[in-house]
Image (cartoon, helix red, strand yellow):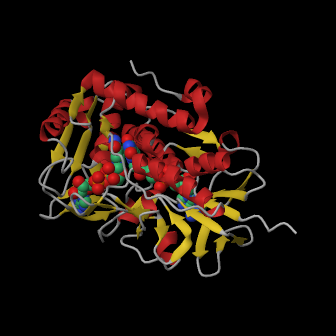
Amino acid sequence: MLAAKPHIVILGAGYGGIVTVKRIAKQLSTNDANITLISKHDYHYQTTWLHEPAAGTLHHDRTRMKIADLIPSHVQFIEDEVVEIHPKENKVSLKNNEQVTYDYLVTALGSVAETFGVEGVYEYAFNKWTLNGARELREHTEYMFAKYNNEQKEEYLTFVVAGAGFTGIEYIGELSERMPELCKEFDVPMNKVKMYVIEAAPTALPGFDPELVEYAMNLLENRGVEFKINMPISKVTEDGVILKDGTEIKAGTVIWATGVRGNPVIEKSGFENMRGRVKVTKDLRAPDYDNVFIIGDCSLIINEQTDRPYPPTAQIATQQAEVAARNLANLVKGRPLEEFQPDIKGTVASLGGKEAIGVIGDKKVFGFSANFMKKMIDNRSLWMIGGTGLVIKKGKNPF
Ligand code: FAD
Ligand code: NAD
């Protein structure tokens, strides 16, 4: 009699999830395992592009693609929200479907906004870096302009970005680039608009190359952005934000970008975690569960050179997915597992239009060359999940 085929379940169709599915489907045949992908929507979106649709410089459809078009036909797809994982029972609870049982699980559910206990973030700030979150923020921005035309309240044209990390900087880069066009469309003089970026640390982009930080800040200031550095936001209210020194900034739009924590499903499911991220073993498994891999923003791995966690990035999520897929195949075939070692190629951040900054290897890039690199990185990530056809359909022009 043939042994039952193992059931591999992958949670989340972001960078980690989709790349795992694509790779595992190549390494295991339909005779080796049944594979199921579960994700909230029937589309994958490029999380790393979301600052663009959020500011309205790119249509959100350019950032998403149907999952059915990305995954092999023998992979089963369930469109549903994961509510809880029961690692002791090898089961996953879903919002709308029955529980799913697995032999091997890959958790790649991404992250949510970190508030660091600041009151009012969930109630009053735009904090969802998801496709629907981006769509809502873009619509709201346009609504604020339309409202200003009727009521002339200054705060409608005041935008506050909380956090000058990469998300905050990339977002304000797009918004400031679009601002002249928005003002023209809504017959509003540019000098009525206020764009603030408020950062708790003593510098924007803490830890990044100071010369490139200066380049970015000068460029953004020339587009009308005002930085408030070394000034944590201590509260978000219906009317705007309150800073640590008590200053109130009235704003119709507050955008939260002060870092992330792992998906709340991790905490709910009882995994030992730090801010929703599980410190995984070298082969990317949850310490107490040999059949559960955790990758991407839900995982935490330590940079042994600095003894600090690596920042959660798509770069790492994708590399982890490659190793998780090989290790799943290793487990199914009874082979030893390999260890994950990140290979950090660099960091490139867009600043809107044809501007960007970055460090690749030990080389600094800015302006045209950085913008070229950024677009090529974006195109490469499309190529990884959908090949040349997807790059032609959704890719970006690097020139
Ligand atoms: P994601 O890619 O976010 O995917 C999570 C998936 O899980 C999604 O499909 C989601 O719908 C699904 N999901 C979530 N909750 C549930 C649930 N309960 N049930 C079912 N499905 C669920 N990193 C870089 O390396 N380079 C960059 O240039 C870069 N730019 C960024 C720009 C922005 C604006 C942002 C917000 C982030 C950026 N990052 C960048 C970080 C990067 O996007 C993340 O580290 C990366 O997306 C993590 O991959 P992941 O697979 O863990 O999660
Ligand atoms: P982050 O941690 O990189 O930056 C958050 C910033 O918010 C920090 O500078 C922090 O000092 C500040 N902050 C925290 N609390 C604050 C408060 N109360 N008031 C004001 N400022 C406050 O987080 P992020 O920018 O959200 O990015 C999340 C992850 O995604 C990171 O790992 C980042 O590297 C990655 N990412 C990468 C890129 C890229 O490579 N181009 C782009 C976006 C995001």
Residue shown at 71% from the left, 67% from the top: 96
Q: Give the x, y percent position of residue 138.
A: 45, 42
In the image, taking residue 244 as reference, residue 238 lies left or right, namely right
Q: Nearer the viewer, residue 265 or 282?
A: 282
Q: Residue furthest top?
A: 399
Q: Nearer the viewer, residue 295 or 42?
A: 295
In the image, taking residue 323 as reference, residue 376 lies left or right, namely left
Q: Residue furthest right?
A: 1
In the image, taking residue 161 as reference, residue 262 lies left or right, namely right
Image quarter (top left, top right, bottom left or bottom right) of the N terminus: bottom right
Residue shown at 30% from the left, 63% from the top: 236
Q: How many marks?
A: 0
Q: Nearer the viewer, residue 324 or 383?
A: 324
Q: Give the x, y percent position of residue 267.
A: 47, 75
- On the question of residue 159 being in view, the answer is no
Q: Give the x, y percent position of residue 133.
A: 48, 51
Residue shown at 76% from the left, 64% from the top: 5
Q: Picture quarter containing residue 258?
A: bottom left
